[in-house]
Image (cartoon, coloured by chain):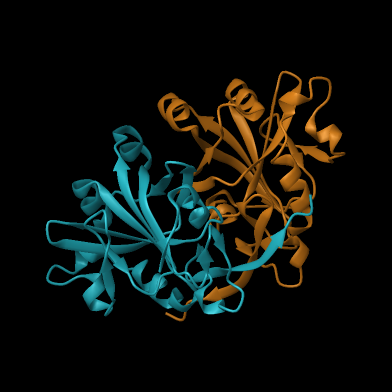
Chain colours: A orange, B cyan
Amino acid sequence: MTPVNISKAYRLLNHGPTTLITSAHNGKRNIMAAAWACALDFDPPKVTVVIDKNTYTRELMEASGVLAINLPCVAQIDLVQKLGSSSGRDLPNTDKFAVNNLTTFDAQQIAVPLLAGCVAWLECKIIPEPHIQKTYDLFIAEVVLAYADERVFSNGRWHFDGHDKLRTIHHIAGGAFFATGTALQASN
Amino acid sequence: MTPVNISKAYRLLNHGPTTLITSAHNGKRNIMAAAWACALDFDPPKVTVVIDKNTYTRELMEASGVLAINLPCVAQIDLVQKLGSSSGRDLPNTDKFAVNNLTTFDAQQIAVPLLAGCVAWLECKIIPEPHIQKTYDLFIAEVVLAYADERVFSNGRWHFDGHDKLRTIHHIAGGAFFATGTALQASN
């Protein structure tokens, strides 16, 4: 794991990968899939993320004011699909981490678990915007700390070649995803 | 070109491709690159898009209340980079379409030009949210009509195999992009 300079954190999300959102409050924790996460500003980095009002994650993140964005990879698509099609609210005596035998580690600046095996993590504090939260399920958050798996991201750049299982993924619908593909460079 | 059922329009953006935003007002028109466009709702489909307040596009879209999202492909990366690094405001007697010899066609429900050679197009009407527009340069819009190049999108699904030059692209930074990669299906 390597720290990501905060001014380059937007590059973790700029190519539009799907995400896993982790949250925690008052001894409860949850993880859900969210494809609709997007960069909003460079430095300090801000992001938007859409979290349906019926989700357990919504309850935890609104109570705590924080969330983490984990970027899963090709090796995790079955897990992402599974986490995206079940609710932590249906598990009153356990949670989705335990049920799925997930290994976590602690975020550094917020009290939220992060998922091991992902390739990047963004610790975020919600900037309260009640109108758009209520009307559109849309949240704005500031990224306060970011880090990545240095095998695929370092010095502000993704480099997936030779690590196909660690490529980020892009959700389409149902269980269908794309892997992040060939790197291309404009000639101008 | 094939119409995209409006309930499936979110699938054009769900995998996080970079976009070209076209706009027009009072005889002026513009085109700019925007990586920060994201799905916001399913049906009716809504999107978010971040448009800096210094851009010419911002002036035109705020005046007209509409914009179009064009999805460029691998064949167009030099053009995307070029359009993303110049302003239509610097061309008082012409515009970026003329300067770059771009072929356009008319949108159907809004008065905005669309760029030929792209692989999908979403016609959008801005839902006014002055606070977030002013504070974050963040716009919410409803997609009123969508269509795609049927060689790569039909029946609500992308299918890029055999059409590598028509793959959508994902912007990282500078002139660096990823092509949309291998299709993957979760096994659960």
* Camera-side residue of B155 and B21: B155
Q: Is residue B115 above or below residue A153?
A: below
Residue found 75% across the figure and 54% down from its top = B186
* Camera-side residue of B1 and A168: B1
* Residue positioned most to the right: A101
Left or right of B169? Residue B28 is left
Q: Is residue B169 in view from this perspective?
A: no
- Residue B57 quadrant: bottom left
Q: How many marks?
A: 0
Q: Is residue B148 above or below residue B133?
A: below
* Camera-side residue of B143 and A35: B143
Q: Is residue B132 above or below residue B45?
A: above
- Residue B86 quadrant: bottom left
Residue B5 point in image, percent of width and height = 45, 53
Residue A54 point in image, percent of width and height = 59, 26
Residue found 71% across the figure and 72% down from its top = A161
- Residue B95 quadrant: bottom left
Left or right of B173? Residue B122 is left
Q: Quadrant of the N terminus of chain B?
A: bottom left
Residue A84 point in image, percent of width and height = 69, 41
Residue found 57% across the figure and 51% down from its top = A9
* Camera-side residue of B31 and B147: B147
Residue B91 point in image, percent of width and height = 18, 69
Left or right of A33? Residue B141 is left
Q: Is residue A77 in view from this perspective?
A: yes
Residue found 84% across the figure and 40% down from its top = A102
